[in-house]
Structure formats: C-alpha cells, structure tokens
Image: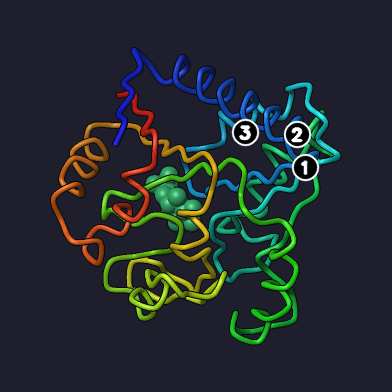
C-alpha cells in the first residue's frame, strides 16, 4: 500500500479533497462522466465539506455510498443523511445520488435488485474513497459478517446485504470486485488506533482484515 502521513487533519482533508477533485476532473475530461463513491461514518465529513464547494461539472458526476445502514434517511445512523448534510449541497448539489436505501422495505434483500440495477450504469467507480474501522472493516465488509465470503469472491454481485454483530443494523454494501475495479482508490483514516490496525491488516488474511481487499491498489491517507 502507499501510505501518506500528514502533519495534521486539516492538511489531510484539504490535500485529499484536492486530489479527489483533480481525479474527478480527469475522468470528466476522459469519459464525459464520473462516479464518486464515498464512505459514511464519523471521519469523512470535513472532506465532503471541502468538496461540496469545488468547481466541477457536478451535473455529470454520480455519487454512491460505499455502504448504507438499513435505517430511514431521517435516522442519525443514515449514511445518506450524512451525504446530504455535508456533500450534496453548494456546487455539488447538482450531483446525482445513486441510492443504496429504499424506504418501504423492512430488510435490504427485497430492495436489492432495484438498487443494483440503478447502480450498474454508473460503474466502474472513477474515484473511490473508503473509510476503515479499527476492526479493519471497510464499506460494510466486516470480519465475521454473514455474507463476507460471498462479498469477497471475484464473481460477487455488485451489492450484497450484510449482517454482523459490530454492524448494529442490517447493511447493504458494494462488494469487493466493485471496490477493486475502481480507477482510483483512497483510504481515509485518522488516529493512532487506525494506523496500527491498517499496519496489522497487511499481514492478516482478508477474511480477518477486509480492508486488505483494496490495499494493494490504494493510497492510504493518515493524520493523527
Ligand atoms: O459504519 C461504517 O464505518 C466505517 C468507518 O467509520 P468511522 O466512523 O470509523 O469513520 C465507514 O467507512 C463505513 O462507510 C460506515 O458505514
């Protein structure tokens, strides 16, 4: 993996947002379209805030989460809600959100075919930004999750539902082949515990450290 250490979080957020914006612009020039996939959780909001003010042809950019928790959008656990609050506003309000949640379904399984059909035309992902938990999960690929093996397989479908003790609620996640097919891959982590975890991940099997599925292709961005 390529590991980039920054002197502080503000600098990290600015440099990473700048790199992502440049790569999206490159995809727009090359392909006339771009897809950006982003994590939820507690870490990425400052990068989203910066990106939302960047001058890009956002009308040609699709945005999809790496994963979603199966909760309504008004829940403070909703990754879609986080996206709307911090990224899909300002200049980025024109971007097209590709949903990973559909109201009216108690469980992700029944919504899955429709969500996957909506995603397919927007692949491959041009720029993939991932987060990681200290348990080395990325997207909703959790160690010990019920469908992890299926999601890591080379012939996995685009999306899978996922349940794991650490995940709290059912999830829906992009699978490993979709993540690995992304043209540019960034991992954003902060703090000593996540640095230690990603260093440990490099020597563990992917089932124990799912972040490994992208580590050979990723730039990891870290600040204390
Ligand atoms: O639950 C999730 O966790 C990971 C990591 O989140 P963080 O709060 O430790 O930054 C995140 O990447 C994933 O998208 C999210 O659903």
Q: Residue at x 37, y 16 (%)?
A: 8
Q: In terms of image quadrants, where is residue 57?
A: top right
Crowd rating for badge 3 (residues with CA inside 10 Å; few <14, some 14–19, many 20+):
many
| In the displayed structure image, the side of residue 152 where residue 78 appears, left or right | right
Give the spatial CA distance, label 3 vs label 1. Answer: 19 Å
Of the two numbered discs 3 and 1 in the rendering, the one whose residue sits closer to the viewer: 1
Which residue is labeled 3 in the image? 48
Residue ID at (56%, 29%): 46
What residue do we see at 66% from left, 55% from top?
80
For the residue pair 210 and 224, the one nearer the viewer reads as 210
The residue where tag 2 is placed is 28
- Is residue 99 positioned above or below 84 on the image? below
Q: Are marks 3 and 2 in contact (CB under 8 Å)?
A: no
Q: Residue at the spot x=65%, y=65% of the render?
A: 100
Task: Name the side, left or right, on which 26 lies relative to 191.
Answer: right
Give the mark nearest the N terminus, 3 or 2.
2
Lower position in the chain sequence, tag 2 or tag 1: 2
**Residue 128, image quadrant:** top right
In this view, the mark in front (3 or 2): 2
Position of the N terminus, as image quadrant, is top left
Tell me residue 140's x, y (percent).
44, 63
Distance between mark 3 and mark 2 Cα atoms: 19 Å
Residue 44: numbered disc: none
Q: Nearer the viewer, residue 144 or 191?
A: 144
Instruction: Name the residue carrying label 1.
Output: 33
Identify whether 206 is placed above or below 194: below
Measure the alpha-carbon separation of dots 2 and 1.
5 Å
Quadrant in the picture for the C terminus: top left
The answer to whether mark 2 and mark 1 are in CB contact below 8 A is yes
Dot 3 or dot 1, earlier in sequence: 1
Q: How many marks?
A: 3
């Amino acid at each position: 993996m390529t590991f980039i250490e920054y002197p502080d979080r503000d600098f990290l957020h600015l440099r990473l947002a700048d790199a992502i914006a440049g790569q999206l612009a490159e995809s727009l020039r090359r392909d006339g379209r771009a897809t950006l996939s982003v994590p939820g959780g507690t870490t990425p909001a400052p990068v989203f805030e910066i990106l939302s003010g960047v001058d890009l042809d956002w009308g040609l950019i699709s945005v999809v989460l790496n994963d979603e928790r199966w909760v309504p959008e008004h829940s403070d656990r909703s990754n879609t809600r986080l996206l709307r609050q911090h990224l899909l506003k300002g200049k980025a309000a024109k971007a097209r959100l590709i949903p990973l949640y559909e109201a009216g379904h108690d469980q992700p399984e029944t919504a899955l075919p429709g969500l996957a059909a909506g995603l397919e035309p927007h692949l491959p992902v041009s720029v993939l930004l991932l987060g990681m938990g200290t348990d080395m999960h990325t997207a909703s690929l959790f160690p010990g999750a019920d469908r992890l093996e299926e999601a890591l397989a080379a012939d996995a479908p685009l999306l899978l539902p996922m349940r794991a003790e650490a995940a709290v609620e059912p999830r829906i996640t992009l699978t490993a082949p979709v993540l690995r097919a992304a043209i540019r891959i960034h991992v954003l982590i902060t703090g000593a515990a996540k640095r230690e975890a990603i260093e440990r991940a490099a020597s563990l099997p992917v089932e124990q450290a799912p972040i490994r599925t992208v580590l050979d292709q990723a730039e990891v961005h870290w600040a204390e």
